Image (cartoon, rainbow, N blue to C red):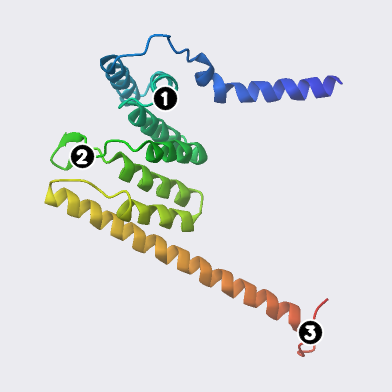
Amino acid sequence: MRSILLSFAVFVLLALPCTATENRVTCHEQKPTPKALLKQLEEGNASFETGDTTRAEAAWTEIRRCAPGSSEWPKAVFNLGILEYSRKNFPQAISYFEAVLQSHPNDKEPAGSLMETNRNYSNRSAMAISHCYEAIGQFTPALRYAWLAKTKYRYCSWCGTDYSSANFAMNKRIAYLALRVSRLHIWAGVLILGFVAIRWKKPGGKATVAF
């Protein structure tokens, strides 16, 4: 009985860090104004830039929990995806980036840079998902999301140089992932053929059926 209680206590202690930020979030009854949400988002961004990921995560999580449907929601969730990617928590990062895609963000929002004229949250989320899958060795879904970034979640830019550079990067990544997928299929085929050959060949050199 004591060992069961001890195991349960260890489980609870291990689970607490994963849910601590979520549990600390308390949404106010009054809906936050767009100005307040923008300020909170920027404060989270500033904290992340200075290395205070705990404060950044808290700010973005509050927006995610308390301001669904707002223009700042997909930005906060995208940032949470970036944070989890930096922690190598790829499944959670994928979940956040998928949520951004489903929220249909304003991809044409100005980015304030000649080399990145628009925010392109959908395109960047699809590419980020592709990188997540590659990081865990799943090249087929990595290729699929890279292709979706090019065909469904198209990159937006009024700058020809920016647009050409982004498309070149996507084409290069698609070609690379297609090669990785094809190599996996080739190696899998070789391994299967080798296994079958070993199973069918007797020590004397004659083939037989192995049961």
Kind of residue indicated by mark 1: Arg
Of mark 1 and mark 3, the one earlier in the sequence is 1
Where residue 210 sits, quadrant-wise, is bottom right
- Identity of the residue drawn at 63% across and 25% down: 14
Question: In the figure, residue 85 lies in which quadrant?
Answer: top left
Residue depicted at x 16% and y 43%? 115
Asked whether the residues under the numbered discs 2 and 1 touch, taking CB atoms below 8 Å apart as contact, a structural biologist would say no
Q: Secondary structure at mark 3?
A: loop
Is 89 left or right of 35, judged from the image as shown? right
Disc 2 to disc 1, how far (Cα)?
Answer: 22 Å
Q: Quadrant of residue 41?
A: top left
- Label 1 with label 3: CB-CB less than 8 Å: no
Residue appearing at x 41%, y 35% in the figure:
81
Indicate the quadrant containing the N terminus: top left, top right, bottom left or bottom right.
top right
Please rate how many residues cluster around mark 2, counting C-alpha atoms within 10 Å: few if below 14, some from 14 to 19, many from 20: many
Identify the residue under disc 2: 118
Give the residue number, with chain letter if any, for mark 1.
64
Q: Which residue is mark 3?
A: 202
- Seen from this angle, which residue lies furthest right? 1
Residue 201 lies, in percent from the top left, at: 75, 84
Q: Nearer the viewer, residue 158 or 203?
A: 158
Give, as a three-letter code, the residue at label 3. Answer: Lys
**Inter-mark Cα distance, 1 to 3:** 63 Å
Mark closest to the chain's N terminus, 3 or 2: 2
